[in-house]
Amino acid sequence: MGSAADSASSGSDVLFHRLESVHLRPRPVDAYSVFATLSIGCISMLYLRLYFLPRDQSRPPFNPPAAIQANEVMYECLSPAEAAAVRLAQRNSASEPATEVTPMVPGTSGEAFSAPLVNRCYRDQCAGRWKPPRTRHCSLCRTCRSGFDHHCAIFANCLTAPHIPSFLSLLLCTPPTVGLLISPMMLPLLRRTRKAWAIACVDEGIRVRWWNWKPSWVIAAGPMGRWAGGLILGWKALDRVDGGGAYGEVRLKIGVLVFLGLLLSAVCLALAYATIQVILDGHLTVDRERARTHSRARASVLALQQQGRPVPSGLMEQMERYAERRWFFVPVTHGPSDGVIVPTLPIDRAYDLGRKRNWALIMGKGWGWVLPWNAVRRGMDMRAVCQWPIAGGTEIWLRLNAERTIIISAAEWASESE
């Protein structure tokens, strides 16, 4: 009796310890809950960060920095023709004083030595605010944004260069989070899908109401939609039989929700890929679309010229409007003025620093931006956004062209004096 009692006692102790170890050991469901909560929290943090951006975010200062006003550094300015038009408008305006109306330097020839004017915006709330390079006026927000990428309706605000790390991190965090959340339901839902399709193929009511109904080809937008409609009807018929599983976990609404999650993940991956390509190419989204418009207009002009047909003036204006050509004030230490206004080449991309530097400029060095809490704190500062670095090759070209302009002008003045 004693030995039997002792063995029973020892057996119960072993069982107790096993149960205790199982209870203390982290279970898969606990790990799933923790990771799901953290993932949803990270996505929520990134989304709220972008949604609650202040309305004046990325708005440039009213006047350019002192170094630009004093013509001490190289900066993008209006072309001489645009500057002349602005000065003429200022002279003819009764409500605005004629500021910065200095004409070309006396004794010089050509527009290269005219006093430079920075670009300013007079639309909506801007009221003459400085418009740095890569700045666009958002007609929805009614203000200018430096480093403007696009206006995002989901965030009800503009996405600008300083906040692209948060945006890209949000896009890349969404697919794995959706995959984690739906992973326990994928296998049951796939089985449910096969059963629903089998019912849709044999059910007489579905055959009469859907498969034999000719407008289903049009209403469902072709074969794919028609098959999806049949699957939905089969799923609904299956739900009426068993109620969508013991707990309703495989009913049609859950299947549709999972499908929308997968669709959202696909959209996020596509947007992430497009955003990465835009950054590496030295573009912002609006710049890329302008470049595409210019390429289409240029191709149309070349095609018309090859066919010997006249080119519409509107097409030529569109090609010129969306061209990459920019004008820069280049300071010099010798010459009739403190600098020269020089254009870039028509195909020169002045702010393309190369794939590696383009990426580091916007996303920062390293891969720390992948972590959501780092992405929120990263991004370009406003000084870099308002004074976007110029590509090394473009800067060399501008300085050489400025020196060339000075030499040619000096030769012209010497011949005129003789």
Image (spheres, grey):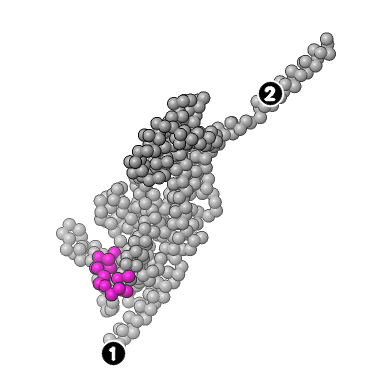
Q: Is residue 366 above or below residue 303?
A: above
Label 2: which secondary element: helix
Q: Is residue 49 on the magenta stretch?
A: no
Residue 155: percent from left, percent from top: 38, 43
Dot 1: element:
loop
Residue 311: in magenta span: yes
Q: Residue at x 35, y 49 (%)?
A: 151
Q: Which residue is mark 1?
A: 418
Dot 1 surroundings within 10 Å: few (below 14), some, or many (20 or more)? few
Tell me: residue 48, above or below residue 82: above
Residue 172 locus on image (x, y percent): 49, 46
> The magenta stretch spans which residues?
303-318
Q: Quadrant of residue 84?
A: bottom left
Which amino acid type is shown beneath numbered disc 2?
A: Leu
* Majority secondary structure in the magenta region: helix
User: At label 1, which amino acid type do we have?
Assistant: Glu
